[in-house]
Amino acid sequence: MAFRIAAQWLHSCAGCEMAILDTGSRLLSLLDGIELVHMPLLVDNKYHAPDRPPEEADIPPADLGLVSGGVANREQLELLQAMRRRCSFLVGLGTCASHGGIPAMINSWPLAEGLAATYENIESGTPPAAGSIPAPLDRVYAVDEKVNIDLLLPGCPPDPEQIHQVLTTLAAGTRPPARTGSVCDRCPTRRHSMADRPQVRRFVEAAAFDPDRPVAAMPCLLEQGLLCMGPVTAGGCEHHGAPACIGARAPCRGCYGPVAGQGNQMVAMMNILASHGLDFRSVVDRRAMLRFAGAHGLLRPVKPK
Amino acid sequence: MPHQSTILAFCCTWCAYPAADLAGTARMDYPAELRIIRVMCSGMVHPDLVLTALEKGAAGVMVLGCRPGGCHYRDGNTITLARMEMVEELMEDFGFDRRRLFVGWCSAAEPDRFADMVRRMSARLERLQGAGEEN
C-alpha cells in the first residue's frame, strides 16, 4: 500500500511547499511510492466548508502529516488538531511551525495593538468585521506548543535535501538521523580572533572577501564586525560546503532557530558579544535576533515603565 | 515579617562559596531566603540561567565572585561583569526590574562582606516589593 501523506498549511507563506518542490527530479521518483491524500495547495478535496465549524475539518487519515506555518487563529488551531488526530506521524515543517517564524514577531506587541497597527497601515484602513475572519489567538504559537509533534524540521525554508531525506526515510519505515551543531560548526570561513572588534555594524555594506577565492578563504563575518547569527543558530542549511547565507557572502540571519530546541537566540547571541568584549550596546535592534524564533513566549510585549 | 521570596545566588567555588561557608560556621546572620548554587567560576553563569531563575519565580538573583584582580582564573570575573551588564539591559526586555540582579565580589576570607551583600539585596527586594513593582 502506498505511503499516505497529508500536508496542511497554517500561518504559512508557501515557501515550505516550494522547498518540497525544490527537491527537484527526485520528487518524481518519490511520488511513485507515496500518495498525497490531502494538500490544499494542490488538491481541492473540500475538507473544510466555510459554513461548517473548522473542528469538522475532514482530513483523510495518513501515515505522515506535514504542517507548515505557525498557529495564529482558531481555525489554524483546529486544523492542526485535526491533523494530529488523523496522522500517525506528524512533522512540523519550517521555522514557523517549529519556532513561530516571522509571523511570531507580532508577539512583541499586545494583540489589539498589533492588529490596529496592521490595519491602519493598509488602504481600507479598517479592521475586518468580527466573524469575517477566524478569531485570533492571544499570540502566535509554534505547532509544538499546541499538539504533540513527532519531528520538527526548521528552516526558512527547510533545505530540500533534508526534506527529501525525511520523506524517504519515513516512507521506508525508519527515522531520519538527528541533526546537531550550529551554523558555525559547519562554516568553513577563517576564524582568528574577535579581540580587535569593539563594535557590531549593520549589514549595509558588503563583507570583505575576494570573489575569486572560495568561502573557506573568507575571514569569519562575525570577526569582520557583522552581526552573524551563526553561533546561536542550528546548522543544516549547507550548499556546496558552506551554510547558505555564508556561501552568498552574507551573515547568517538565524532562520533555523536556536541550536538547542528551546534556546533563546537573542540571549545567547548577546552573551557571545558581551563575553568576547564587543560593545553589545552597538546592536541596533536586539529583539530582531528573535525574528525567526519568537514563539514559545520568547517575544512578548515589553511592559511600559 | 514572614516572606516567601527566594534569592538565588550563584557563588564561585574559590571565593564567594567559601565566604558563605565561613559565614555559616561563624554563625553570622543573613536572610534565610538565600539559596546558593555553587559554580566553578562566576564567569560561567550563562545569562539564560539568570533569566530562567527570574522567570521561575526567584525574587532576585545574585552572582558573586572573587574580588577584581583576585580571580582564580585571572579574568573570569571580568567576563562576569561584561555578561551581567548585558543581562541587566536584557532584563527590561523580559519585564524584570534590573535591580533584581546583584553582582558582587568578596574574597574567601570575607564572610562579613558576603552576609552584608545578602542583607543589602534582601532589603532592596523588599523595597521593590513594597513599591508594588511586581516584575
Image (cartoon, rainbow, N blue to C red):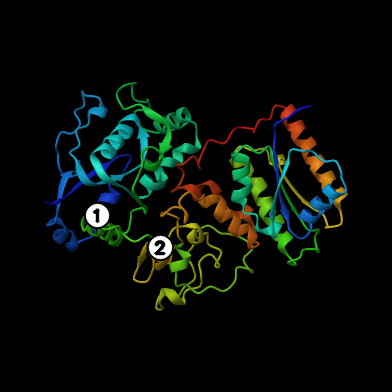
Q: Give how far apart the Cα atoms at labels 2 and 1 are.
A: 20 Å
Q: Single out the residue that lies furthest toward the front.
A: B25
Which residue position is annotated with label 1? A20
Residue at image position (43%, 41%) is A104
Graded by Cα atoms within 10 Å as few (under 14), some (14 to 19) or many (20 or more), the crowding at tag 1 reads many
**Is residue A268 shown above or below A65?**
below
- The part of the image, by quadrant, that contains residue B67 is bottom right
The numbered mark 2 sits on a residue in which chain? A
| Residue A27, image x, y percentages | 18, 59
Element type at marker 1? helix
| Residue A194, image x, y percentages | 60, 68
Residue at image position (57%, 36%) is A302
Which of these two is toward me, A170 or A57? A170
Which residue position is annotated with label 2? A245
Q: Is residue A125 left or right of residue B107?
A: left
Element type at marker 2? helix
Q: Is residue A276 left or right of residue A94?
A: right
> Which quadrant: the C terminus of chain B?
top right
